[in-house]
Amino acid sequence: MKAKIKQSSKFFVYMLECYDGTYYTGYTLNLEKRLKEHNQGKRGAKYTRGRRPVRLVWHKKYKYLCYAMKAEYKIKHLNRRQKELLVAGMRLDKVMAKK
């Protein structure tokens, strides 16, 4: 039964800009709830705890968890310039080509 729930779910990959100007990338099922967790310290990532407030600067919806996890991995390995291009609206595959 859980597999059906996961297959029909929407997973979000997101980027936050922290107070110090750095970026944090993650994935979640509930984007609004996760953003609140990051800002309130409840189950927020250790990285963002000392860099609050954070604000959502980019997100994309994926149907399957495996695609969301692959996208998160790729984004985490981008350099700062590439992440800025992604935030500005460039597609991830195009950003990846701009190494």
Image (cartoon, rainbow, N blue to C red):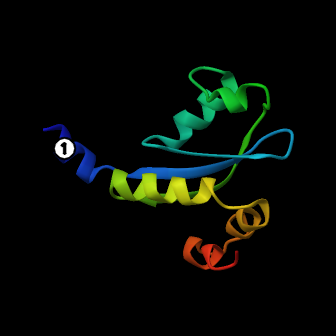
Image position of 39 (left or right of 94): right
Quarter of the view holding residue 92: bottom right
Q: Residue furthest left?
A: 1
**Lateral position of residue 50 relative to residue 32, left or right:** right
Q: Position of residue 97 (x, y in %)?
A: 63, 79
The outermost residue toward the right is 20
Q: Position of residue 63 (x, y in %)?
A: 34, 58
Dot 1 corresponds to which residue?
Answer: 3
- Who is closer to the viewer here, 7 or 69? 69
In the displayed structure, 23 sits above or below 88; it is above
Residue at position x 25%, y 52% in the image: 8
- Element marked by disc 1: helix
Amino acid found under the numbered disc labelled 1: Ala
| Location of residue 70 by image quarter | bottom left
Tell me the quarter of the image containing the C terminus: bottom right
Question: Is 69 placed left or right of 97 in the picture?
Answer: left
Q: Left or right of 9: which side holds 57? A: right
